[in-house]
Image: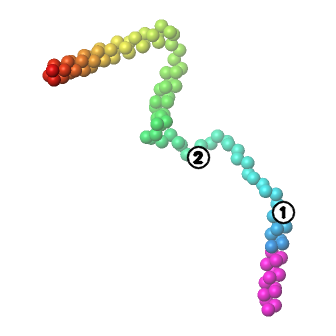
């Protein structure tokens, strides 16, 4: 019976010691400080935001160009001259197919 009393006394003493330690130590929270380091590269191939390094450097080099308004308009006009013939041919072919189907079914 004395063994049970001794064990109970030890348990009670440990509880009191734990409570005393809990009261002494205030709840300290570690503050998160962002130092800017990345743990993992989130530029994953296949995601919509994926940009290979090759394209990002090319885009940066193009943005560094200082084009005048006249040069920019000349570039746009040149691109339109390249794409318009193809677009017109595609529209004419689509119109021709539409006419062929309409005459066939009437």
Horizontal arrangement in the rendering, residue 39 relative to residue 28 (left or right): left
Residue drawn 85% across and 62% down?
Answer: 24
Residue 83, image quadrant: top left
Q: Secondary structure at mark 1?
A: helix
Which of these two is toward me, 106 or 27? Answer: 106
Residue drawn 79% across and 78% down?
Answer: 11
Crowding at dot 1, Cα within 10 Å, few <14 / some 14-19 / many 20+, comes out as few
Which quarter of the rendered picture does the N terminus lie within?
bottom right
x, y percentage for residue 70? 48, 7
x, y percentage for residue 7? 79, 84
Query: Residue 10 in magenta?
Result: yes
Indicate how the structure is coloured in the image.
rainbow
Horizontal arrangement in the rendering, residue 52 relative to residue 93 (left or right): right
Which quarter of the rendered picture does the C terminus lie within?
top left
Q: Secondary structure at mark 2?
A: loop
Residue at the far bottom in the pictured view: 1
User: What residue does disc 2 label?
Assistant: 39
Label the magenta part by its dominant secondary structure: helix
Query: Mark 2 and mark 1: span between their CA atoms?
Result: 37 Å
Query: Is there CB contact under 8 Å for labels 2 and 1?
Result: no
**Residue 93, visible in the rendered structure:** no
x, y percentage for residue 89? 26, 16
User: What residue does disc 1 label?
Assistant: 23
Residue drawn 38% across and 15% down?
Answer: 79
x, y percentage for residue 75? 42, 13
Read off the magenta span. Answer: 1-14
Question: In the image, is residue 27 above or below residue 59?
Answer: below
């Amino acid at each position: 019976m004395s063994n049970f009393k001794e064990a109970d006394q030890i348990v009670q003493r440990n509880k009191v010691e734990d409570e005393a330690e809990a009261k002494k130590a205030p709840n300290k929270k570690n503050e998160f400080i962002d130092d800017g380091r990345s743990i993992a590269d989130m530029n994953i191939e296949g995601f919509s935001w994926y940009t290979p390094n090759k394209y990002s450097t090319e885009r940066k080099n193009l943005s560094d160009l200082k084009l005048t308004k006249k040069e920019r308009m000349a570039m746009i006009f040149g691109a339109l001259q390249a794409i318009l013939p193809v677009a017109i041919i595609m529209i004419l072919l689509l119109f021709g197919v539409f006419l062929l189907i309409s005459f066939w079914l009437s």
